[in-house]
Amino acid sequence: VYVITFSLGLILLDHVDLSAFAYSTENGTSKILGPLVAGVIQGYVYSILVKASAYTGGTDFVSAIVHKHSPQMGFFGVTFTLNACVAVCSYFVYGYQMEPVILCILYSFMSTTVGERLMKSGREAICFEIITNSPQEVSRELIDRLHHTATFIPARGMYSGRDTSVLLCVVNKTQVALVSQIVHKY
């Protein structure tokens, strides 16, 4: 679906006058703006496709296979590496010119960085390990203010030998400041 949509889009855009959107400066056009904007757009598309377990049919498909067999290798990192390798190999295709290669690497970097950021946005969490003598009060406030619960673990300090409590609480990244306020209070 992606390949067909992309191909049809290119065919349609050949017949549309886009000169009103051309970016130019007093010295001419900007060569860097195109790869940056295209990278941002492609990164957005990557994030949608990956969330839907779909791929463009290019290096991202190979990256998905590599990531499946080696989960420690990040999908977007592998995609960038493969795209950068293709760009470096294209040095010979572009008549030994370095600028198209660098612009292609910039595009690949932007698309994978934006895709990865959009995939992680809203889903990243932080685990707090709160050592406290007031587990009931802290957990009650976490539940009331953050709508997150905590796991209570009885503990003993190895240096002091005193009994204490550990609360494990996983919260959204956006709630870190609020957890810090609650912990600081106790």
Image (spheres, rainbow, N blue to C red):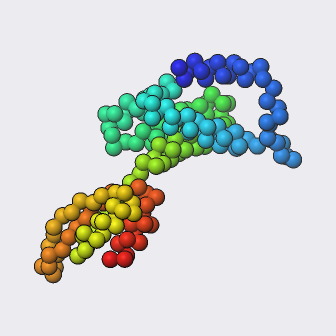
Residue 70 visible in rendering: yes
Is residue 84 rendered to the left or right of residue 169? right
Say which of 161 and 78 sits in front: 161
Residue 9 placed where, x, y %? 66, 22
Residue at 27% from the left image edge and 60% from the top image edge: 150
Q: Quadrant of residue 155?
A: bottom left
Residue 108 in sight: no
Q: Quadrant of residue 34?
A: top right
Q: Residue 29, percent across and down?
A: 80, 41
Residue found at x 40% / y 42% = 74
Q: Which quadrant: the C terminus?
A: bottom left
Q: Residue furthest right?
A: 26
Identify which residue is drawn at 64% across, 18% down. 8
The percent coordinates of residue 108 (x first, y second) are 56, 39
**How many numbered circles are shown?**
0
Locate residue 158, reporting x and y percent: 15, 75
Instruction: Pick whichever, 141 or 174, lies toward us.
Output: 141
Q: Residue at x 67, y 22 (%)?
A: 10
In the picture, measured across the screen, residue 38 lies left or right of residue 181, that is right
Image position of 22 (left or right of 158)? right
Residue 11 lies in what quarter of the image?
Answer: top right
Tell me if residue 65 comes above or below residue 137 in the rendering. Answer: above
Near-viewer residue (80 or 151): 151
Outermost residue, left direction?
Answer: 161
Please determine whether, in this image, residue 106 is positioned above or below residue 2: below
